[in-house]
Image (cartoon, grey):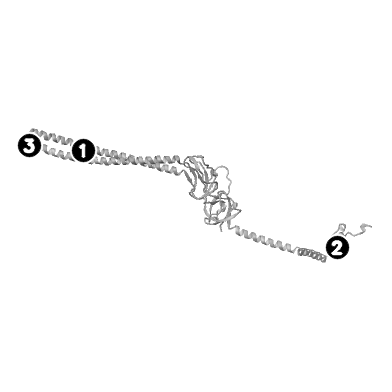
Amino acid sequence: MDTAAKPDISTAHRRELGESTPGDRTRSPPRIDNDQREKNSETVKTTVLQRMRQHAIAIIGASIAAVILIAIGIIWWLHARQYESTDDAFIDARTVTISPQISGDIRDVPVNDNQVVKAGTILVQIDDSIYRAQRAQSAAQVDQAKANIANLDAQLDAQQARIDQAKNQETQTRAALTFAQQEFDRAAELAKTGNGTVQQAQQTQSNLKQAQANVEGAAANTVAAIKQLAILQAQRSAAVAQLENAQAQVDLADTNLSYTIIKAPTDGRVTKLTAAKGAYVAPGQAVMMFVPNAIWVTANFKETQLDHIRVGQPVDISIDALGGRSFHGHVDSIQAGSGTVFSLLPAENATGNFVKVVQRVPVKIVFDQMPDVELGPGMSVVPAVKVQ
């Protein structure tokens, strides 16, 4: 069978549609009237409508999904613009290094690693035998100083009595001197008139000189007694100073004795425990770290985020260690300066080439109510501050 005699179906179809065929390339293109064009356009529209009817459910679903996504995006944008957030934030606390203030052997460590303790709980006990002996020795010195003061008080009383006695004796001698002076004056008058004897005049003169000597002796005795009183008073002042020194030694011994028991300064947890029973410790040697229960969040916001952040604004605190569980808090304060200014080696922008870098400023955020879970310094959080 001659295959060339058979018409090409695709070619015939093309000719019906008014399209050119490879064989018609050498001939002029056929003329297509307006009716044929309208017929072809209606055919295409019908095909498109049929396909749309076949996929109507998918098209409707896609349209609804697009509307929902746009609505969600608008809602998210309206919600997100009310918050300032950062992932450069951590749990913070004022950790305490527990170290002894005296040296000695550790007698007992009644706490364990990561134990929760109350304020006043005994953390470490140091052997106190030496410090008790020092306290007893200081107490004995106090008793000795008190006895010395009591002895001097008695001597002062006796010396005061001697002074009184010396003054009385001086008064008696002065009275005797007055009488002797009067006797001498009378004897001298009698001698002038010839009524008295020379012997009597000489006797009264001798009595006068003796009375004068007695007065001088009594006065000197009084002065010596008074000076001895001043000496005893000075000795008593020294004894009082010695007592105060001894009492200070007792107070120091009591203080050292109290240092043999190290207690928790506040409620918190024991961490990095290195103290062991029987180990020797020196003053300042760290035996453990102590984390108080009072914690907060230090969030390092970019300086461009601080425009709307104010003290007292509410904060949602999401904690990574709890699977993103959130807690409520508020902005407590904003540090007066960026973090680099207070670092160990602050940047020196006055030298070399300057490249502007957005700085971060620490913001302190406190919990409205302390979390009922154990949180420690350094744990990552994501705070979101509601600024509008």
Q: Amino acid at mark 2?
A: Glu
Q: Residue at x 31, y 39 (%)?
A: 235
Image spot of residue 299 (x, y percent): 56, 51
Sequence-first disc among 2 and 3: 2
Q: In this rendering, does residue 336 appear at all?
A: no
Question: Between residues 97 and 115, which one lies in front from this camera angle?
Answer: 115
Sequence-first disc among 2 and 1: 2
- Read off the residue under disc 1: 219
Circle 1 residues within 10 Å: few <14, some 14–19, many ≥20? some
Q: Residue furthest bottom?
A: 35
Quarter of the image containing the C terminus?
bottom right
- Read off the residue under disc 2: 16
SS of the residue under disc 3: helix
For residue 183, above or below residue 46: above
Question: Between residues 254 and 15, which one lies in front from this camera angle?
Answer: 254
Q: Amino acid at mark 1?
A: Ala
Q: Residue at x 20, y 37 (%)?
A: 218
Q: Residue furthest right?
A: 1
SS of the residue under disc 1: helix
